[in-house]
Image (cartoon, rainbow, N blue to C red):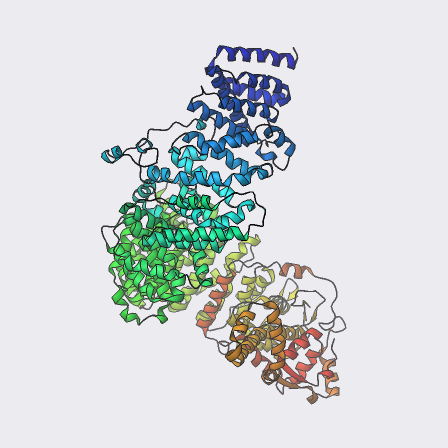
């Protein structure tokens, strides 16, 4: 039997089922047919399905119902297959039957015998049908026309008629009508372009008409049955106890996986939600731009009413207090709520209509907060403005018919009238929510439009805040005030003190709900930060006590919140606010927190250490506490036993495993076993990085010898840990900690014979790892060497370690590692350059002289060194190498790599490259400083009459270039006075020639920096695979170490250091050597030097 005959037989059986009304089988039949259609193709089934469609519009209601069930299940199954089989709608579609099905459904809808449920089922089916070919708009317009042309206008007119009926009627059906309209005007942009213009006003009118329905049912919980035809509660309702609507059964959920049906059971809520989504689609259409721009006020007024808080949200705040401060972006219920949809629509309106939207928001919120309704005068002003706008645009062709009368009706119906006190509170809460949500836009608007002052409204809130008794309104006001901290700081910083006072009183109020306390604590943190920032502009801090600043009782409330709420987001918020509070008043708050909160901080650290945000907050909080000597002792006594016990566990673990050679991350992960000691040790390793950071904090702020001795007990376990450890980040943290121990405990190290162990750790850090990714473990190895040499070896270096440092430099690819290791040698050269060169000349690295390895990598890396003290130290060391005039350096060939990274060439004599690097360093450091000084001087000269113009020009690139040209003319004399003066006449030609011959040994193989050739070496390739992991943190650590060492002559600006260097280079006893080397530089180098050094008789140089 062929496929066609089989399908014919299947059809006969299917028809039999239709005629015998075996309804219960139709779900399975439709599913089977959908599989067959996928297998056979739509074309083979088209005639059969059309024949079924033709049977449905009969007077036999049961057959109609069966047909609707069949096609609903069929389209639902097809939609599921799109998802499951990952098939695009354009690859498989029921489009051939859609025109006939749409026409048939329209005739069925007109059947007066259909009940409400059947009509809803029909509209649900229509929704699935329309969505099934929405992809084709503007891609396959012929297909869309085939599906829509016969029935589109009829369906649209039917929908508009349905929306004009009483808002209470046909609610389920209207939900899906709105969904269909949204698909049509959102997805069928091309096809619907001709009909869309006349549909805005009916939809807008419907939008306004459901506002009372939504307010009474969803906001005030009045069941639908207690609302009369005018959408007002009947008298019987007020006599009843609180009631709910009967449970709704959604017909759509049987066939669809609609998000709103899953999240929201209330049909009126879903009706409103879908209407707002439709309005969101229409409001941003270019077709309606002019009309929405004129009529944006009533639209926003209606949206502001829809934002009123519902009973569900009120209960959510009570039973889940954290929801008041933490927005869970994954919470679909909140994300798709009416309140959130309204806010998203307002954002879209601001993007589209700019200041008109912001002004309307500002005015409406002001009316809500002040308890004023839009009065007749204000409404009349809107109508008059609309009338004037229509007259201005009367010559423009438009098919949108919005008369003055219709506009008046829209304004009238855009609000909800209720004189109850409860309504006023909800109105104010909605206004505060909107103001806070759009704070950035309103602030910018008020800056541009001085006649509107949001600050007055904020003052009103602060003034009336403490009179409120409604918890939700209190929390919303606190949140809103904190959102406007920027404009308060710009216009009246004293308001922060008032805000601090009322917020703290709110926390002290025992009657407030938990969510109010959370909002208040978060707001207090923001306000404290602002007061600390503007402290100099406020009164003397000793007078802060009037506003409650310094009242340590607030610390106890923070601790109570930490005790009650232990979820990560809340803990993070409380810790952040605590930081800001202690920064504001360290003396009182820190001591109190240390006394009552040290155990809580330790508890948070041990339980929530895995959370990076919380861990960072704990560390910052500890730093703030230990900065206060009185608080330090309390915190140390509370936390140090935990640290000592943790390291004791590690010691016990080593005793149980005496053969342990190394510890890797893999080994740490395997420690979760039944053995209790292993489990505890695993926890130790999980927390050790943070424990080391805490130890480092204690060391840096330790002032007491007994505390220092307690800490020094950890040194030996730390050394053992570093010798065994192979985990990179842990090794970094341990290195920093060990370096801090050296600063305070060198005597302990001598007494306990730990010097060799220290050297062993350093040598481990300087090892060359097999895996280049492991190099990050030695990021701070150079810093550790510097401190160890200084504290343990009297500033001298260990020969083995010094050799290994050069080898590590040679093999390192991380810029931060190279910088730290070069710094070790730079300090040694600054102390005794000749001795350093002697040692470097005594050994080699892989058949390369050690001094060449060091200078090559150093000069390649010097342009990217960071940190003022680092650059000062290394530049000074390079100048000392240059001025040694040592034959070993003069005969040394350095890689001729231009620091501009533009080319690579053969090797050149090292002094030339050193001088070139110093010149480029001088230019890099002098350029920004000179420009800054010029601009500052220029601003002083012209400030009297041209201040405003200069401020504008600061942001204009073209004007800035003009400023630079003018600077060059006005300040040329000033520049010359600041330059170092060098006269080349003092050098005789014959002396030049002699010295030139003496110092150009090896020049038969190479030349000056000007003789570049295309080429490279393996060493170059290897040397430039630099990374910048932890760069900024490493720079800060290095600068701190150099400050601690207090080296002479480096604690000045880098530009000043380079000036001193060039003064020395051009001194009488060095000028000849300087000039000889200068001759061999690139012209570019000489011109850069000329910018900062006044060179007379420059023409004597033979520029390359």
- Which quadrant, please, contains the C terminus? bottom right
Residue 540 shows in this picture: yes
Say which of 200 and 567 sits in front.
200
Placement of 191 over or under 424, stated as above or below: above
On screen, 1047 above or below 627? below
At x 41%, y 28%, the residue is 250
Which quadrant does the N terminus fall into? top right
Residue occupying the point 62% across, 67% down = 850
Question: Residue 455 in the image: x percent, y percent?
Answer: 37, 62
Question: Which of the 4 image quadrants contains residue 575?
Answer: bottom left
- Measuring from the top left, give residue 99's x and y in whole percent: 59, 25
User: How many numbered tags mark residues here?
Assistant: 0
Left-right relation of 949 to 305: right
| Residue 172 image point, x, y percent | 42, 30
Q: Quadrant of the rendered structure where residue 1011 is?
A: bottom right
* In this view, 940 is above or below 573: below
Q: Is residue 579 visible?
A: no
Q: Position of residue 980 (x, y in %)?
A: 61, 83
* Residue nearer the viewer, 531 or 1023: 531
For the residue pair 479 and 893, the one nearer the viewer reads as: 479
């Amino acid at each position: 039997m062929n496929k066609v005959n089989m399908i014919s037989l299947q059809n006969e059986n299917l028809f039999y089922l239709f005629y015998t009304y075996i309804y219960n089988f139709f779900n399975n039949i439709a599913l089977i047919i959908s599989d067959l259609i996928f297998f056979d193709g739509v074309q083979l089934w088209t005639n059969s399905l059309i024949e079924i469609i033709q049977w449905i519009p009969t007077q036999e209601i049961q057959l109609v119902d069966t047909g609707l069930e069949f096609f609903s299940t069929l389209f639902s199954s097809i939609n599921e297959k799109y998802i499951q089989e990952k098939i695009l709608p354009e690859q498989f579609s029921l489009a051939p039957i859609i025109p006939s099905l749409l026409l048939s459904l329209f005739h069925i809808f007109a059947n007066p015998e259909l009940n409400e449920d059947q009509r809803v089922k029909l509209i649900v089916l229509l929704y699935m049908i329309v969505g099934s070919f929405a992809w084709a708009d503007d891609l396959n317009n012929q297909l869309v026309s085939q599906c829509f042309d016969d029935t589109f206008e009829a369906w649209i007119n039917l929908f508009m008629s349905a929306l004009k009926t009483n808002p209470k009627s046909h609610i389920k059906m209207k939900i899906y009508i709105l969904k269909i309209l949204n698909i049509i005007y959102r997805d069928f942009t091309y096809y619907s372009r001709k009909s869309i213009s006349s549909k805005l006003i009916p939809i807008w009118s419907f939008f306004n008409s459901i506002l009372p329905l939504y307010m009474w049912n969803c906001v005030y919980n009045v069941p639908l049955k207690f609302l009369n035809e005018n959408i007002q509660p009947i008298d019987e309702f007020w006599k009843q106890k609180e009631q709910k609507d009967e449970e709704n059964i959604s017909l759509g959920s049987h066939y669809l996986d609609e998000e709103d049906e899953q999240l929201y059971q209330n049909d009126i809520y879903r009706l409103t939600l879908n209407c707002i989504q439709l309005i969101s689609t229409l409001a941003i259409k270019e077709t309606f731009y002019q009309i929405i721009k004129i009529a944006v006020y009533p639209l926003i007024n209606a949206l502001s009413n829809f934002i009123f808080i519902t009973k569900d949200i009120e209960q959510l705040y009570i039973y889940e207090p954290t929801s008041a401060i933490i927005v869970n972006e994954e919470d679909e219920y909140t994300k798709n709520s009416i309140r959130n949809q309204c806010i998203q629509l307002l954002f879209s309106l601001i993007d589209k209509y700019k200041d008109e939207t912001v002004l309307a928001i500002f005015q409406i919120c002001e009316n809500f907060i002040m308890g004023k309704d839009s009065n007749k005068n204000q409404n009349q002003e809107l109508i008059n403005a609309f009338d004037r706008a229509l007259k201005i645009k009367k010559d423009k062709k438009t098919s949108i018919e919005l008369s003055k009368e219709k506009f008046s009706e829209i304004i009238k119906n855009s609000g909800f009238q209720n004189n109850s006190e409860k309504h006023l509170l909800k109105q104010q809460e909605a206004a505060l929510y909107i103001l806070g949500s759009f704070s950035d836009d309103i602030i910018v608007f008020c800056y541009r439009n001085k006649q509107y002052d949001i600050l007055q409204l904020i003052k009103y809130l602060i003034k009336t805040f403490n009179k409120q008794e409604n918890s939700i309104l209190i929390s919303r006001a606190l949140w809103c005030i904190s959102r406007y901290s920027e404009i308060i700081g710009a216009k009246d910083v004293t308001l922060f003190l008032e805000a601090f006072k009322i917020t703290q009183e709110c926390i002290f109020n025992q009657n407030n709900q938990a969510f109010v306390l959370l909002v208040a604590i978060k707001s207090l943190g923001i306000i404290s930060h602002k007061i600390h920032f503007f402290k100099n502009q406020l009164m003397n801090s000793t007078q802060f006590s009037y506003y409650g600043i310094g009242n340590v009782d607030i610390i106890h409330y923070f601790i109570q919140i930490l005790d009650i709420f232990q979820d990560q987001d809340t803990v993070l918020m409380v810790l952040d606010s605590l930081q800001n509070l202690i920064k504001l008043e360290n003396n009182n708050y820190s001591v109190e927190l240390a006394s009552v909160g040290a155990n809580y901080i330790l508890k948070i650290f041990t339980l929530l250490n895995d959370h990076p945000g919380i861990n960072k907050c704990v560390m910052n909080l500890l730093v703030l506490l230990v900065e206060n000597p009185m608080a330090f002792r309390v915190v140390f006594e509370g936390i140090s036993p935990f640290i000592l016990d943790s390291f004791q566990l590690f010691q016990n673990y080593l005793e149980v495993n005496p053969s342990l050679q190394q510890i890797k991350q893999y080994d740490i992960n395997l420690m979760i076993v039944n053995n209790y000691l292993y489990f505890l040790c695993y926890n130790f390793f999980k927390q050790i990085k943070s424990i080391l950071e805490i130890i480092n904090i204690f060391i840096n702020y330790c002032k007491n010898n007994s505390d220092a001795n307690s800490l020094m007990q950890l040194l030996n376990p730390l050394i053992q840990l570093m010798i065994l450890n192979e985990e990179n980040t842990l090794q970094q943290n341990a290195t920093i900690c060990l370096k801090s121990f050296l600063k305070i405990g060198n005597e302990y190290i001598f007494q306990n014979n730990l010097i060799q162990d220290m050297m062993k750790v350093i040598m481990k850090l300087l090892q060359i790892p097999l895996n280049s990714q492991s190099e990050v473990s030695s990021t701070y190895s150079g810093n550790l060497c510097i401190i160890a040499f200084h504290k343990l070896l009297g500033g001298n270096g260990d020969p083995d370690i010094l050799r290994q440092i050069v080898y590590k430099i040679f093999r390192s690819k991380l810029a931060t590692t190279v910088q730290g290791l070069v710094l070790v040698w730079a300090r040694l050269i600054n102390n005794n350059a000749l001795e350093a060169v002697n040692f470097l000349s005594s050994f080699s690295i892989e058949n390369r002289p050690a001094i060449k390895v060091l200078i090559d990598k150093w000069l390649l890396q010097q342009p990217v060194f960071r940190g003022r003290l680092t650059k000062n130290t290394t530049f000074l060391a390079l100048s000392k190498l240059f001025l040694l005039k040592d034959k070993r350096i003069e005969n040394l060939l350095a890689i001729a790599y231009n620091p501009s990274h533009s080319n690579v060439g053969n090797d050149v004599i090292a002094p030339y490259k050193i001088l070139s690097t110093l010149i480029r360093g001088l230019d890099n450091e002098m350029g920004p400083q000179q420009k800054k000084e010029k601009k500052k001087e220029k601003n002083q000269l012209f400030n009297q009459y041209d201040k405003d113009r200069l401020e504008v020009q600061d942001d204009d690139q073209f004007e800035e270039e003009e400023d630079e040209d003018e600077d060059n003319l006005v300040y040329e004399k000033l520049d010359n006075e600041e330059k170092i003066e060098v006269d080349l006449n003092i050098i005789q030609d014959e002396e030049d020639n002699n010295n030139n011959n003496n110092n150009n040994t090896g020049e038969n193989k190479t030349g000056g920096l000007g003789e570049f050739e295309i080429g490279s070496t393996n060493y170059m390739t290897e040397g430039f695979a630099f990374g910048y992991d932890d760069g900024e943190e490493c720079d800060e650590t290095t600068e701190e170490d150099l400050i601690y060492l207090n080296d002479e002559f480096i604690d000045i600006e880098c530009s000043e250091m380079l000036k001193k260097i060039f003064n020395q280079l051009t001194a009488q006893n060095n000028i000849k050597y300087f000039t000889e080397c200068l001759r061999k530089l690139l012209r570019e180098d000489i011109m850069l030097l000329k910018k900062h050094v006044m060179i007379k008789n420059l023409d004597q140089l033979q520029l390359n």
